[in-house]
Amino acid sequence: MMIEMKEVSKWYGTVQVLNNCSTNIKKGEVVVVCGPSGSGKSTLIKVINALEPFQKGEIYVDGQAVHDPKTDLPKLRSRVGMVFQNFELFPHLSVTENLTLAQIKVLGRSQDEAKTHGLKYLDRVGLMLHKDKFPGQLSGGQQQRVAIARALSMDPIAMLFDEPTSALDPEMVGEVLDCMMGLATDGMTMMVVTHEMGFAKKVGSRVIFMDVGGKILEDCSKDEFFMHPENRQARTKDFLNKIL
Ligand code: ADP
Ligand code: MG
């Protein structure tokens, strides 16, 4: 088991944003998380690598207890790659510097080692020619691929994506999804918040549907999710009708 969540609840003040969420993600699984805006999808992703604290329940990443105060959280975070909607590259650093910074600072790799490693992943996302550019000189799709390469440079045991294509112009969505599908095919454990149901159908293992109030309403295999729509909850059907 790569990620285990047991009865996790989280509140912002008095507002409950995760309500007793439990799920398990096995090594190599690709779990797609969908649901309406405000249902807690981003929060569900963030609690996994402790970017947000939670008040109740347990989370284990590769057996390490996220909720245990004794756990080395920076180290744990360095092992779980995150890709956000808005890329979050450092604008004042070149692509190569973006790729190497955390490897050097967090993993203690040498400049050379970090560069070799980072460029290997940059090549893999097809952007070697852009290694000396700055993020502002790249398209949104290219920036997101750099962000993916940067996360991969840390040799993560799992990758979490929070709506990685929703800030992109439509013509750039495909290149980022292709890149993510490649990762999935190579066996990366992934949790992906997205409404790209084509991605879910092609490489998803499971689909989680979250509903307002931070509840996991459905958690089922991809085949069950798409092939037996009659078994879906009314709220899920409503939602799918709106986005498909
Ligand atoms: P989603 O990603 O599904 O749109 P979020 O996880 O971003 O949902 O948010 C879930 C709920 O938590 C929303 O009601 C949102 O307004 C609230 N929320 C998110 N971040 C904060 C915060 N930092 N402080 C207070 N409320 C927040
Ligand atoms: Mg969100």
Image (cartoon, rainbow, N blue to C red):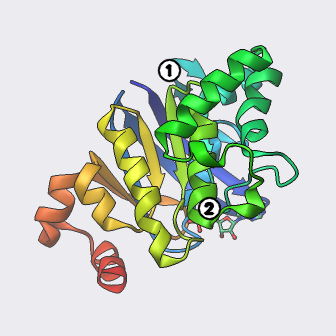
Q: Nearer the viewer, residue 151 or 237?
A: 151
Residue 193 in view in this figure: yes
Mark 1 or mark 2: whose residue is earlier in sequence: 1
In this rendering, the answer to whether 153 lies above or below 144 is: above
At horizontal 72% and vertical 45% (from top left) the residue drawn is: 95
Q: Which mark is residue 91?
A: none
Left or right of 115 on screen, residue 179: left
Q: Secondary structure at mark 1?
A: loop
How far across and how far down the image is residue 227, in percent? 11, 63
Q: Nearer the viewer, residue 44 or 18?
A: 44
Identify residue for label 2: 85
At horizontal 73% and vertical 62% (from top left) the residue drawn is: 137
Identify residue for label 1: 62
Q: How far apart are the alpha carbons under marks 1 and 2?
A: 25 Å
Residue farthest along the right direction in this orientation: 92
Quarter that holds the C terminus: bottom left
Residue 71 in view in this figure: no
The amino acid sitting under disc 2 is Gln
Left or right of 1 on screen, residue 205: left
How far across and how far down the image is residue 3, in percent? 47, 31
Q: Say if mark 1 contacts mark 2, CB within 8 Å.
A: no
Q: Is mark 2 within 8 Å of ligand 2?
A: yes
Q: Is mark 1 within 8 Å of ligand 1?
A: no
The amino acid sitting under disc 1 is Asp
In this rendering, the answer to whether 51 lies above or below 144 is: above
Left or right of 150 on screen, residue 236: left
**Where is residue 237, by image quadrant?**
bottom left
